[in-house]
């Protein structure tokens, strides 16, 4: 390598280490003009562009780096970042997978692949929900099916746009909820739990969110395995405006029963 070129690379790397990415980019732009076959110069140019929030330029530089050195895992990693920053989540995941293929122990690539996979899964759940909500005519039970998909989207990625749709659908379902009976064989031990459930249901119907939360929480202290109680608690939290607590309660309901019908309210009858 030309000593002058080598010296410029060292100078550029020092600028990167100092966080002077504009200066570094200018140095590496000159370097790749001097020698377009230097994969390291293209890599650092891509890194500098990425730090300067120029993801399209970063992608081009990093692809050139990988064309010269396909086994450079860090170039794959940064390409994933550049693609992800422009909204190409699938492309980012592919880049992270390639980083892991060439360097299986690359912990950063694995971490970002995991988070990107969650984004992809969140997006798919949201798409399924939107499809149900826009279908004409809407199929029977669409509210609860769409609600579950929106819930899973938010569970995968807390900032998913599904969060807004989830709140709107929860309000619609709360306003038009249908009550079903859960008939259980009379057992004195179940009576306090059933009373708390009845109190919670009545409080929900009258929009007394704080009382509903208190009643259902008391019920859960006695018996925690009923998905419908967690679901109802979630609607009470939503009515109070505590979206995070609502989502956690709904997710607990889903964990207990992935088929939970969120459009129904349950009245417990001991007979």
Image (tube, helix red, strand yellow):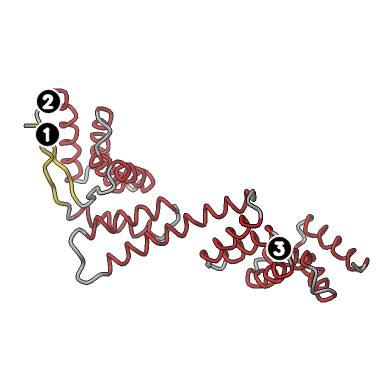
Whether residue 7 is situated above or below residue 210 in the rendered picture: below
Residue 263 placement, left or right of 152: left
Residue 124: image quadrant is: bottom left
Apparent side of residue 214 relative to residue 90 in the rendered image (left or right): left
Disc 1 crowd, CA 10 A, few/some/many (<14, 14-19, 20+): few
Quadrant where the N terminus sits is bottom right
x 10%, y 36%: residue = 269
Is residue 97 placed above or below 49 in the rendered structure?
Answer: above
Q: Which residue is mark 3?
A: 47
Specify the farthest residue to the left.
271
Instruction: Return the residue nearer the eye: 101 or 56.
Output: 101
Q: Which mark is residue 187?
A: 2
Q: Position of residue 109 (x, y in %)?
A: 61, 54
Where residue 56 appears, as percent x and y from the top left, is 63, 72
Structural distance between the alpha carbons of marks 3 and 2: 68 Å
Q: Residue at x 70, y 70 (%)?
A: 67
């Amino acid at each position: 390598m030309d000593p002058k070129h080598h010296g410029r690379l060292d100078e550029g790397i020092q600028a990167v280490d100092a966080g002077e990415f504009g200066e570094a980019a200018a140095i590496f732009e000159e370097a790749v003009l001097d020698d377009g076959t230097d994969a390291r110069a293209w890599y650092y140019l891509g890194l500098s562009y990425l730090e300067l929030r120029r993801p399209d330029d970063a992608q081009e530089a990093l692809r050139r780096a990988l064309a010269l050195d396909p086994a450079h895992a860090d170039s794959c990693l940064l390409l994933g970042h550049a693609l992800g920053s422009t909204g190409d989540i699938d492309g980012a995941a592919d880049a992270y997978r390639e980083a892991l293929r060439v360097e299986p122990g690359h912990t950063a690539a694995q971490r970002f692949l995991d988070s990107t996979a969650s984004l992809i899964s969140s997006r798919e759940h949201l798409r399924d929900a939107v499809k149900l909500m826009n279908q004409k005519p809407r199929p029977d039970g669409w509210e609860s099916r769409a609600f579950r998909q929106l819930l899973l989207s938010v569970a995968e990625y807390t900032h998913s746009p599904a969060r807004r749709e989830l709140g709107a659908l929860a309000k619609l379902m709360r306003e038009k909820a249908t009550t079903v009976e859960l008939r259980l064989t009379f057992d004195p031990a179940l009576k306090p739990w059933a009373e708390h459930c009845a109190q919670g249901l009545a409080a929900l119907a009258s929009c007394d969110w704080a009382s509903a939360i208190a009643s259902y929480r008391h019920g859960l202290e006695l018996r925690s395995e009923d998905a419908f109680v967690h679901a109802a608690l979630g609607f009470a939290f939503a009515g109070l405006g505590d979206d995070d607590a609502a989502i956690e309660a709904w997710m607990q309901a889903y964990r207990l029963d992935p088929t939970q019908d969120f459009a129904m309210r349950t009245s417990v009858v001991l007979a």
